[in-house]
Image (cartoon, rainbow, N blue to C red):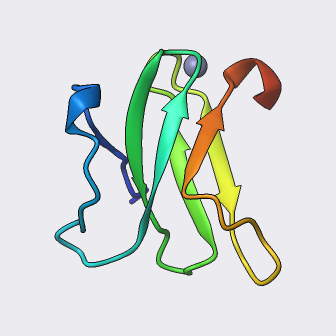
Amino acid sequence: MDPMAEWIADQSARQPDLPRSGRPWLGVHYACAGVYGRVIQDRSGTCYYTTCPRCSKRCTIRVGSGGTSNRMFTVSCSALGG
Ligand SMILES: [Zn+2]
């Protein structure tokens, strides 16, 4: 089962928070949909999988040593292709 992002409908609700699972997460801005979301880390601990709430395109955010330290990503569907 794919991990599902937990959507935050209200942007004002963007507060640092831990998911019930205790796994780390990233804040994501979906430029396509104009909303913010929260993506829970994959079990592997190396990826974050998310799906655009508007057009259902899939996006994979990879993390790792030497990777970005950003905690907020912008997902632009037009740049994902497919
Ligand atoms: Zn989209």
- The percent position of residue 13, horizontal first and vertical second, equals 20, 37
Q: Quadrant of the C terminus?
A: top right
Q: Quadrant of the N terminus?
A: bottom left
Residue shown at 68% from the left, 26% from the top: 76
**Residue 45 versus residue 25: which sits nearer the camera?**
25
Q: Give above or below for 79 relative to 39.
A: above
Q: Is residue 81 visible?
A: no
Q: Give above or below for 41 relative to 54.
A: below
Q: Judge from the rendering whether residue 15 lies leftward or rightward of residue 54; answer left or right.
A: left
- The percent position of residue 5, horizontal first and vertical second, equals 37, 47
| Total count of labels | 0
**Residue 62 versus residue 82: which sits nearer the camera?**
62
**Image quadrant assignment for residue 70:** bottom right
**Residue 8 versus residue 44: which sits nearer the camera?**
8
Q: Judge from the rendering whether residue 51 lies leftward or rightward of residue 66; answer left or right.
A: left
- The percent position of residue 18, horizontal first and vertical second, equals 24, 68
**Image quadrant assignment for residue 53:** top left
Residue shown at 51% from the left, 45% from the top: 50
Q: Give above or below for 10 relative to 51.
A: above
Q: Quadrant of ligand 1?
A: top right
